[in-house]
Amino acid sequence: MSDLVIVAFADEATAFEARAELVRLQKDYLIEMEDAVVITRDESGHVKLHQPVNLTLAGAAGGTFWGALIGLIFLNPLLGAAAGAGAGAISGALTDVGIDDDFLKDVGKALDRGQSAVAVLIRKMTADKVLARMEGFRAKGRIIQTSLTGEAEAKLRAVLERTAPMGTAEPQLGGNTHR
């Protein structure tokens, strides 16, 4: 079973940096991700999903290859390639793997203008090593949603979220009347 983690950041650059670090962690075999999407909301309020792979383009490329191969068998590789590219592009556009796009767009609408988030679907990870490598993002993020265990979520919050300074509880309780 996979775990979903969504972390919001104050700007787009930090979200893209976080995803890049997660990709490096995957190359080092410390995390295995099914999906890692950067969600951005621009100043005009438009939400955009930045998928790591363009499925329409990948489908078209794969379809072109297979169409040309089949076309060679029937002595018309150009027609086969064109038909394969079209079929691949359609199948790629209709295929949605990983985190549901409509859900991610709803998350994006909940962000403040100019903010971003990274949504990661984690298949498995070596948590202590991943958290140590994500130390560069200390106090830069805010967890929006997670399906991690309570203990794992607490460790992630300790790394990413800013700890509120210790102080008096007066403003929360209505203030001090002895001033």
Image: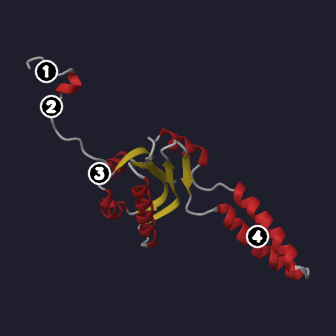
In primary-sequence order, the first of circles 2 and 3 is 3
Residue hosting label 2: 168
- Circles 2, 1 touching at the beta carbon (< 8 Å): yes
Residue hosting label 1: 176
How dense is the environment of label 1, judged by Cα within 10 Å: few (below 14), some, or many (20 and up)?
A: few
In primary-sequence order, the first of circles 4 and 2 is 4
How dense is the environment of label 3, judged by Cα within 10 Å: few (below 14), some, or many (20 and up)?
A: some
Circle 1 or circle 4, nearest the eye: 1
Residue hosting label 3: 139
Q: Residue furthest front?
A: 44
Alpha carbons under labels 2 and 3: distance apart: 22 Å
Question: Please, what secondary structure does the residue beneath circle 3 have?
Answer: loop
The vertical placement of 33 against 144, above or below, is below
x 15%, y 31%: residue? 168
Q: Amino acid at mark 3?
A: Ala
Q: Amino acid at mark 4?
A: Gly
Question: Please, what secondary structure does the residue beneath circle 2 have?
Answer: loop
Q: Residue furthest top?
A: 177
How dense is the environment of label 2, judged by Cα within 10 Å: few (below 14), some, or many (20 and up)?
A: few
x 79%, y 64%: residue? 86
